[in-house]
Amino acid sequence: MTKYIALVLGMGLMANAAFANEGIAELDTNGDGLITADELSAVFPDVTAETFAEIDADGNGAMDDDEMAAAVEAGLIPEKAQ
C-alpha cells in the first residue's frame, strides 16, 4: 500500500512538471525558456508584481518550469489561461 501511495504521488508530481513545461512553451513569447512578468501578465492580467516576486523563488526576474509548477501547486496562478 505504501508503494502504491508513493507511486500515485510521484505521478502527480510528474504531471505538474509536464504541465509546467507545456505552460512555459505557451507563455514564453520570446523563446528563451523563461517567463517574465510581462509575458505572464499578458496571459494572466490579475497576477500582480508582488505575486510574480513570490513566484520567482530565485529572484532572477523570470519564472522557470520549476517555479511555474510550484506557483500552480500553491494556487498563485491558474493551471490554464482563461
Image: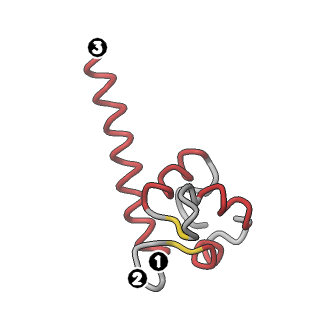
Q: Position of residue 39 (x, y in %)?
A: 57, 78
Q: Which residue is mark 1?
A: 28
Q: Quadrant of the C terminus?
A: bottom right
Which element is circle 1 on?
loop
Q: Position of residue 24 (x, y in %)?
A: 44, 68
Q: Position of residue 70 (x, y in %)?
A: 51, 49
Q: Position of residue 63 (x, y in %)?
A: 52, 65
Left or right: 65 as drawn, with respect to 58: left
Residue 1's label in the rendered image is 3
Residue at the farthest front position? 59
Q: Which residue appears at 66% of the width and 61% of the height?
A: 53
Choose between 46 and 48: the one closer to the eye.
48
Q: Nearer the viewer, mark 3 or mark 1?
A: 1
Q: Which residue appears at 63% of the width and 79% of the height?
A: 38
Q: Nearer the viewer, mark 3 or mark 2?
A: 2
Q: Earlier in the sequence, mark 3 or mark 1?
A: 3
Q: Is residue 14 above or below residue 78?
A: above
The three-letter amino acid code for the residue at tag 2 is Gly
Q: Is residue 46 above or below residue 78?
A: below
Q: Earlier in the sequence, mark 3 or mark 2?
A: 3
Q: Which residue is mark 2?
A: 31
The three-letter amino acid code for the residue at tag 3 is Met
Which element is circle 2 on?
loop
Q: Quadrant of residue 4?
A: top left
Whether the residues at callouts 1 and 2 have beta carbons within 8 Å, the answer is: yes
Q: Quadrant of residue 57?
A: bottom right
Whether the residues at callouts 3 and 1 have beta carbons within 8 Å, the answer is: no
